[in-house]
Every structure is written in C-alpha cells, then in structure tokens.
Image (cartoon, rainbow, N blue to C red):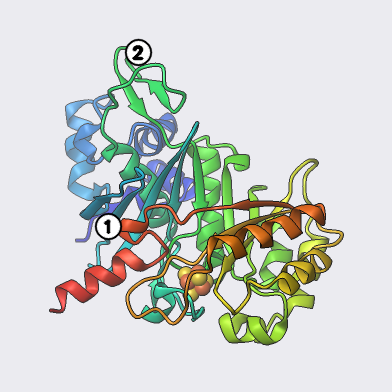
Amino acid sequence: MEKINLKALSKQELESFIRDSGLPSFRTRQLLNWIYVKYAQDIQDITEFSKELRESLSERTCISNLKLLDRQTSKDGTEKFLFELEDRETIESVLISDNERLTLCISSQVGCAMGCRFCLTGKLGLKRNLRPHEIVDQIISVSRIIKPPVIAHHPILTKGRSGDSLYKKITNVVLMGMGEPLANAENVVDALWRITGLMKMSPRRITLSTSGIAAKITGLPKKAPMVNLAISLNATTDEVRDYLMPINRIYPLKKLLGACRRFPLPARRKITFEYVLLKDINDTPEDAKRLISLLKGIPSKVNLIPFNAYDRAEFQRPDDESVLTFQDILTKGHILAFIRKSAGQDILAACGQLKARYKIENSK
Ligand code: SF4
C-alpha cells in the first residue's frame, strides 16, 4: 500500500488523518510544527513522538523531500539550486543575498506555457503544475541546505533554536522562478497560506510575480494572503508586448493595467513593475515616457532589469547609458525606478536557465 505523504496534506486533511487514526488532536499541531518549522525530513526525526508512535506512523506515512541535483554559487553570492521531484521532473530555486535580505526565488510550475520570448523557461514548455507542498518545499529544502555562517551579528543571521549556534534565515520569498504562478493559482494560493500560516512568514515579505493574467489578478485578494504583487510588463505598446509576451493577446495593456488599478492595495504598498530592458526593442526614451503615462494612477515602482544575455539569445543587453537615461526619464516623471542587475550572471540566474543548461548538458 502506498504511504500517505504527510507533507502533501493540507491542514484540514492532516486533522482528518489524525482523527481517523484515533490520535489526539494536538498531534496535528505537533506534526505541522515538525514539518513546517523544524523541517523534519523523516517521521523518525520527530523526537517529540514516542518510539512506538514513530514506528506505527512510519508504516503508513512518510514525509517527502526534494532531492538536490545541483547547486551553484555565483561570484556575487547568488546561489542556484536544482531540485528533483518525486516523478523525476526538475525545478529550480535561486537564493539572492542583498544587504539585510536573503530572498528565495521559487518556482510554481515545471516549465511554463506562457512562451515569453526573452525567457529560457518559456522555451522548455509546460510539463506540469507544482503541488502546494512542492512549492513550499523549496523554502524548507534551501533553509536546510544553507550552511551555518561564519560571521556573527550579521542582520540576516539568526540565533539557532538552541540559542548556541547561528544560521542563515530566508527573509523574503518571491514567486518569480519557473512558471506562471497564476496559471497554477489554486495550488499557489494553498502554498501561500502554508507559508504565511504554518511557516509564519509575513505576507509583506512575499511577492507574487505574474506575466499578466488579468482575470486572476482581480480574484487574488479574495483568496490569497495579501502578498505583494509584481507585474512582468516589459513593453509599453501592445504591438511590442504581443511580440514579447503572447499573454498580451488575451490581456492587452489596457485590461492588465485596469486590473492593477482596481487591485485593493494596502496603505503604503505599491505594485512592482518588472521591465526587462532589451536593446532596440523596448529601451528607447519614448518607451520610458509612455511608461510614465501607462502607470498613472497606480501606486507603483519599476524594476529595470538589463537583459541577461545567454548563448544564442535573440536579444541583446542595452548599453549602460541607455539604461541610465531610461531610469532618469522615469525618475523625472515621478516614478520610483531601480536598476536591478541580473543576479548571478555567471551561473545563469535568470529564470529557467539552470534547468535549461542541465537539460542540455545531460542530453549530450
Ligand atoms: S518569463 Fe515567466 S511567465 Fe514568461 S515564459 Fe518565463 S517563466 Fe513563463
């Protein structure tokens, strides 16, 4: 008989399982704590349970774990993790260290069906949606993998549970890895409740990035915790956006930005607009001026990301001067604009690139 994977169960399903097993209800709380806070990898890790209880649970249940296939560290400290799922599909997560923040970029699908032209994941196509526990497990797995640090009193380092050791702690999570989160909205929403409710991460520290499924953006606040919203915009005309991002043919700029305007933002929060700058495609001063008009009425900030060129890429990175001019025009138009360097350029840290390379190398 196939064992029940306790990590795959929702809180309600776990409660039913505990009840049906004739165990007291406090065992649910203990199990959730061991899985989502203490990161137990096996029933036998749960030392709070008697040996007999562990043995009987082990006969019927298990706790799944992602298998680490590859880990690369960039010169700038960015780390990429390639994980294998139970069906041997692979996903990736990227850990970015930035001053006081340690941000984990996680995947929501195996591959992606959205077909954005500048993205390697888009070229791989969609294999399947990730299940809620597979989304959450990226945070658990990377948290376990991170090595104990050597420097004390660093802001991103936290006292170990025993109080005597120090370990790095993920402070922020972005759903910006492989996949379109809103194309797997039900599982992503379930994962977000686990991350905020069971792992106790503040929704303010979580960002969901979408290529622009406007209908799902509108429904999000009713279903999910109030996480930050980021829109991968990348163009200022429908013509260019249709070319770069096929989703624009279904939800053109007017519909997408209309959904953003209606999005019930909490006080002092902004929507982040990601804008990958592609030489001679979307990087002109006219684009910058159009962007100012498009974002009117939306509390927003813009992340400008000069394209991270890869082998045989169709696009080029703009020169630094064009990037600075673009930023300058936005700033003068009262739009908060930041230039983000693509983290981990030497290890291919744009979404999908590690997996794409792994596939290529292993098919040689
Ligand atoms: S940019 Fe995001 S939505 Fe577009 S193809 Fe890549 S992973 Fe999918």
Judge from the rendering whether residue 204 lies leftward or rightward of residue 349; answer left or right. right
Residue 171, position in %: x, y? 49, 36
Quarter of image, res 41 = top left
- Which quadrant is home to the C terminus? bottom left
Circles 1 and 2, Cβ within 8 Å, touching? The answer is no
Residue at 46 percent across and 50 percent down: it is 10
**x, y (%) of residue 197?**
54, 39
Give residue 22's position: percent from left, percent from top: 36, 39
Q: Name the residue under label 1.
A: 83
19 w.r.t. 317: above or below: above
Q: Is residue 319 left or right of residue 42?
A: right
Residue linked to disc 2: 163
Q: Is mark 2 on a helix, strand or loop?
A: loop
As drawn, the residue found furthest toward the left would be 364
Q: Of 14 and 257, which appears nearest the observer? A: 257
Residue located farthest toward the right when viewing the structure as drawn: 297
Which circle's residue, 1 or 2, is located before the other in the chain?
A: 1
